[in-house]
Amino acid sequence: FEFALAGFDESGIDLQFQGDYMVLSAKAPVSDEKPDDIRYFKRRLKLKDVADQKYFVPADKFDREQVKALFKNGLLKVTVPSLENVETKEGIKINIVQEDAK
């Protein structure tokens, strides 16, 4: 997963697993600057909090203990490796029978 979080601080980013989901939230940094005292040549975008965003990462298919997250230059890269022995459930074959036309 890659998340563009330019302008956010690493300390304001929360990433955790809840059930079969990876949940991302981020708090926008609070600036102590007074807007009346500042003149802008170019106006900066206002940062808003990122509410809980859920991404499906089933526990039976991914190794949550080996997750790596790197935050650099406003980009959060999260690597969730898959389990080596993914259990696949065998299906039951259903035979299709043609009805005789009379």
Image: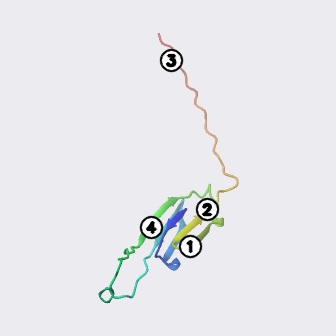
Mark on residue 80? Answer: 2
Depth order, front residue of 43/23? 43
Residue position for label 4: 52
Badge 3 amino acid: Glu
Residue 92: x and y in percent read 61, 36
What residue did someone put label 1 on? 71
Q: Quote the CA–CA distance across marks 2 and 1.
A: 15 Å
Which residue shows up at 44% across the image and 67% down it?
52
Q: CA distance from mark 4 to mark 3?
A: 53 Å
Q: Is residue 66 left or right of residue 45?
A: right
- Kindly indicate the quadrant of the structure image that contains residue 29: bottom left
Q: Amino acid at mark 4?
A: Asp
SS at circle 2: loop
Q: Are marks 1 and 3 in contact (CB under 8 Å)?
A: no
Pointer 3 residue: 99
* Disc 2: CA contacts within 10 A as few (<14), some (14-19) or many (>=20): some
Helix, strand or loop at label 4? It is: strand
Q: Report the quarter where the N terminus lies.
A: bottom right
